[in-house]
Amino acid sequence: MTKILFSLLLFFITLNAADNESAVPSSSTEFVLKSFSLKDVVLQKKENYYTIILATVEPGLDYNKFIQDNKIKYNAIAYHFGQENKYVKIIFGAYETYEDAFNALIRLDTNLLSNRPYVERVSKHIHLFHKYDNVIED
């Protein structure tokens, strides 16, 4: 059993070293998951990924402060949608599989988990992002 666990750990360490990836912030573990650049996925319209929906808010809320305070700017996007840009959706990360996205979700900081985040395909968000002429701010 120990040999299997060690092999799995070595596999994840090797995977991390071999790929250009980023770690998801975690308060409880150093387990590293493969995450792609959400900004690249959205701008290049790569629809076969999954993302974590962190929140849907009204534009009056300082969503940029939410992103800054939670230290997720490196892989988060906030975009306006709806009639007269009625809402802002905050999404985080781009993952190849639902399982990867879910594993990243459960490792999020408790401040982010309190909003009840969930996983969805990124295709819907790519469509809304471009439909409402959003731009990615640096």
Image: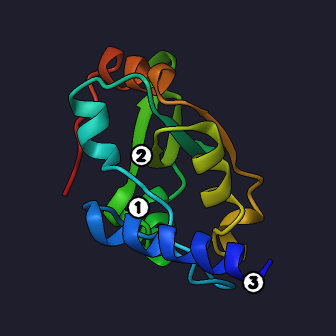
Rounded to the nearest angstrom, the CA distance separating label 3 from label 1 is 45 Å
- Eyeballing the image, is 70 above or below 20? below
- Tag 1 and tag 2, C-beta contact below 8 Å: yes
Image quadrant holding the C terminus, namely bottom left
Amino acid type, label 3: Thr
Badge 3 or badge 1: first in the primary sequence: 3
Residue marked by disc 3: 2
The location of residue 58, given as percent across then percent down, is 58, 42
Number of the front mark, 3 or 2: 3
Residue 53 or 102: which is nearer the viewer?
A: 102
Rounded to the nearest angstrom, the CA distance separating label 3 from label 2 is 43 Å
Residue marked by disc 1: 64
Q: Residue at x 28, y 44 (%)?
A: 39
Disc 2 secondary structure class: strand
Amino acid type, label 1: Asn
Residue marked by disc 2: 78
Badge 3 or badge 2: first in the primary sequence: 3
Is residue 55 among the parts visible in the rendering?
no
- Tag 3 and tag 1, C-beta contact below 8 Å: no
Mark 2 crowdedness (10 Å alpha carbons): few <14, some 14-19, many ≥20: many
Rounded to the nearest angstrom, the CA distance separating label 1 from label 2 is 8 Å
Number of the front mark, 3 or 1: 3
The location of residue 126, given as percent across then percent down, is 38, 24
Q: Residue at x 58, y 49 (%)?
A: 100
